Image (tube, grey):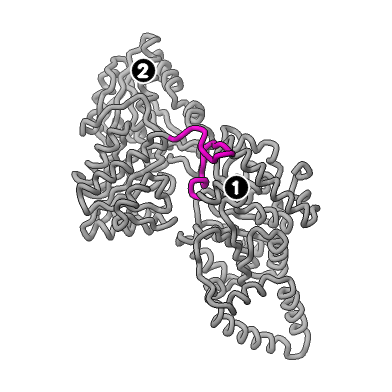
Amino acid sequence: MEQIHSPEDVKRLDDKETEALCRELREFLIENVSHTGGHLASNLGVVELTVALHRVFDTWRDRLVFDVGHQCYIHKILTGRKDTFGTLRSFQGVAGFPKPAESEHDAFIAGHASTSVSVALGMARARTIRGEHYSVVAVLGDGALTGGLAYEGLNDAGESGEPLIVVLNDNGMSITENVGGIASHLARQRVKPQYFEFKKTYRRIMGVIPGGKRIYRVTHRVKTAVKKALWPCSMFEDMGFTYLGPVDGHDIKKLTYLLQWARQINTTVLIHVRTVKGKGYPFAEEHPNEFHGISRFQIETGEPICASGKSFSGVFGETMLKLAEKDPRVCAVTAAMQSGTGLDEFSSRYPKRFFDVGIAEGHATAMCAGMAKQGLLPVFAVYSSFLQRAYDMLLHDVAISGLHVVFAVDRAGLVGEDGETHQGAFDASFLAQVPGMTVLCPASYGELSSMLEYALFECSGPVAVRYPRGCEGNYRGKWGRGTHAVLRRGKDITLAGYGVMVNELTEAAELLEAEGISAEVLKLDSIAPLDYDAVLDCALRTGRLLVAEESIQEGSVGMRIGAEAAKRGICLKNFALKNLGNVFIPHGSVPELLAMCGLNGKGIAETAGEMCHDR
């Protein structure tokens, strides 16, 4: 690794040196991620594949498009970010996902699944239209094939005829079984260098001899018919791809050769690569899901350095168990996030009422609509940033019919180290726009349990219960089943917010008190419908209103309150919005990001103090 400063250095290594590089990369990856946390298992599985890609392609010019982007660490290390890799996912450090603003070698930002083929096809078409010459490669994980968008991209790409390479990284999901000894033999033959050399020679000869092209077409049809009879995995060829593989994803020599061949034949190619998730680190190989996204850990034992305690996700899972025991209609749905959303125990205890649909949030939402229509009580546990993918189904399939589907919106607000693609900055705005939608915002574990039960058994129509990643703060109160609660009385300014933001508001009020400013803290329990009367009554009493929230500004609660005040002709002494603005928030710890946005107690107090001194 000491010799590697750019991808050009990788190309100069021989096969033996390249294998040594792969070993060192694994050691480097384990050592660094043990200190920073991150996506370990998926990156350990693509070491050889990534090195092979850089042996064949020039990523400053050729376009390498990752799906999801979890598996881009080796790519980053090989493209000039080795020396700064210790800052992975830290504030202003190396991002955990591909980021074009960070390096010209990162072709496209990625954080959500199933998009790579569509993006890559767009790039290939742009290349053709502009008459340029470069390769386009999409790296698609087998898990992404649970998302419908992947098939939309594959279907169009296969039919397009555009020179495009799709690398299918199969690290667990069985796509189709090869049947029988003949099929296994064919699989071995298809990845041998002699096979490709024969194909190239045969195609070249048939292209120049009289009648050769016609003979080639006939023999190709016969070969295809025989192959389909013996080789069931022809879905991709039916779509129009030249299918290569399956190949051992840890055989660097074969991978390099296959990628070179795929580039040479200049057509739409799919390379089926089989890898082992967590390869080279026993704990990750044995428990790949636990090492998918992991916090800092001890290399010797694989144990986390800071054991995870109670969390909003965990409380959600516990509450779901109690509610399912209470009513047999209660079902839990997730989109490939069983553990992340706290549903492991539910899936074990109520397997017939638990549904993991894969990376398919749109399908999950529409399915919940069907379940609700027929009398069940479905709860869709989904990360805020992933719920964005189901907005159409939320409107069309759930809300128009007023169906009673409960959305448990996890990771609402800032999530930290995963950055722009994962911050839950939009749901507070877009959920409130949905007619008939109820949006509840617990600020503590106790409130989450109470609101979830209320959402299931006392509400009608679509309901969202939104809560953050991680733990509750100093506020540990219980829900009084109202739309709001005044946590602290004051006479100079009203500080309003919802969810765990009330902890920052309370801290700000204490800081202001030290300056002789009396601040009222108003906790909003429901942001749709929003109790405008309660908010404006408080604001009129103090004369000043500051609304703080981990949301984008457009469509925010603060903007809605301001519009309602203007509509009623209410004029306050001062009014301010504190939110995430209209920008995408980068990666960093949540406290660092709150400080950056002025949304921590100190930042809120500073703005409130200026408002009170501006008489």
For this orientation, the residue located farthest to the front is 301
Viewport quadrant of the N terminus: top right
Q: Residue 16 location in percent, x, y? A: 78, 55
| Above or below: residue 71 compared with residue 311 | below
Disc 2 element: helix
For this orientation, the residue located farthest to the left is 458
> Could you tell me which residue is drawn at 26 percent across and 22 percent down?
540
Q: Is residue 601 left or right of residue 448?
A: right
Could you say which quadrant of the image residue 89 lies in? top right
* Most frequent secondary structure within the magenta stretch: loop
Q: How crowded is mark 1: few (under 14 residues within 10 Å), some or many (20 or more)?
A: some
Q: Residue 391 location in percent, x, y? A: 38, 52
CA–CA distance between discs 2 and 1? Answer: 49 Å
Say if the magenta span includes residue 403.
no
> Could you tell me which residue is drawn at 34 percent across and 32 percent down?
499
Compare residues 457 and 98 and report the one nearer the observer.
457
Compare residues 180 and 14 and report the one nearer the observer.
180
Query: Which of label 2 and label 1 is nearer to you?
Result: 1
Query: Magenta span covers which residues?
Result: 288-308
| Above or below: residue 301 compared with residue 198 | above
Residue type at mark 1? Answer: Tyr
Q: Residues within 10 Å of mark 2 (few under 14, many from 20)?
A: many
Could you say which quadrant of the image residue 365 lies in? bottom left
Could you say which quadrant of the image residue 184 lies in? bottom right
Q: In this figure, which residue is indicated by the disc labeled 2?
A: 509
Q: Is residue 525 left or right of residue 255?
A: left
Q: Earlier along the polypeptide chain: callout 2 or callout 1?
A: 1
Q: In this view, does 228 lie to the left or right of 247?
A: left
Q: Residue 571 location in percent, x, y? A: 30, 24
Q: In this view, does 451 lie to the left or right of 604?
A: left
Q: Is residue 88 in sight in this rendering?
A: yes
